[in-house]
Image (cartoon, helix red, strand yellow):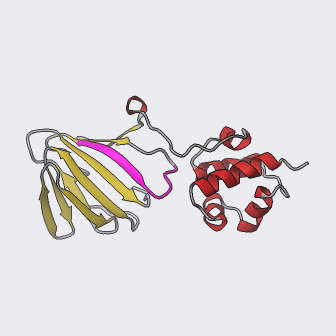
Amino acid sequence: MVDEGVGEQVRRYRTARRMSQRALGAQAGVTSGFLSQLETGRANASVATLRRLADALGVSLGDLVAPGPVPAGRVVRAGSRRRLSASDGMVKWFLTEPPHGHVEMYAVTIEPGGSTGPRQYRHGDAEEVILVTVGSVTVELDDEVYRLAEGDSVVFRSSTPHRVSNAAGVVAELVWVNSPPTPE
């Protein structure tokens, strides 16, 4: 017996996120043909496949099996943000929850003397944006060095060797965005 409700929920979440069947299939490891059959109620999916689809859509498995409206947005409450101690003196708080879709956003603090690490690093080939909201930081992009003060921002490719450090005497606070998300 085919459960048409699950396929309909997959379609609702996919279209709400403006994803094609091909894009969702690539992220979840299924074909667009299978997704078409699932969404039209002509095929069922295993629990493992539904989990991969849920992950690719950024929802829980329960969201796919419980019929109902698809929310327009996802709220991440300040008090429940996931925290990642990225390196010595630097902490990231996730402002988006995985999977992030097309954007990954962090609130970052860098203690005086803290940095992203002792050397420049690179990852993926996304666009990164750093906005300084409090304090100041030094951003190294390959051979170029920029000193950013409160309100300043920089945009660069994540494939460019980069490093961010805080040589000031106060904690720096940043908003850091990767689009699309990249492995660190």
In the image, residue 1 sits, relative to residue 79, either above or below, namely below
In the image, residue 74 sits, relative to residue 53, either above or below, namely above
In the image, residue 7 sits, relative to residue 128, either above or below, namely above
> Is 103 colored magenta in this rendering?
yes
Q: Quadrant of residue 60?
A: top right
Name which residue lies at 74% across and 51% down.
Answer: 8
Q: Where is residue 26? Give x, y as percent.
A: 63, 65
Q: Where is residue 166? Give x, y as percent.
A: 15, 48
In the image, residue 20 sits, relative to residue 148, either above or below, namely below
Left or right of 113, for residue 116: right
Name which residue lies at 82% across and 52% down.
Answer: 44
Extreme top residue here? 79
Left or right of 67, for residue 158: left
Q: Which residues are magenta?
A: 99-109
Residue 119 makes an appearance in the image: no
Left or right of 76, for residue 47: right
Q: Nearer the viewer, residue 134 or 181?
A: 134
Name which residue lies at 37% across and 57% down.
Answer: 178
Q: Where is residue 102? Give x, y as percent.
A: 47, 58
Q: Quadrant of residue 159?
A: bottom left
> Is 2 colored magenta in this rendering?
no
Q: Where is residue 81? Give x, y as percent.
A: 41, 35
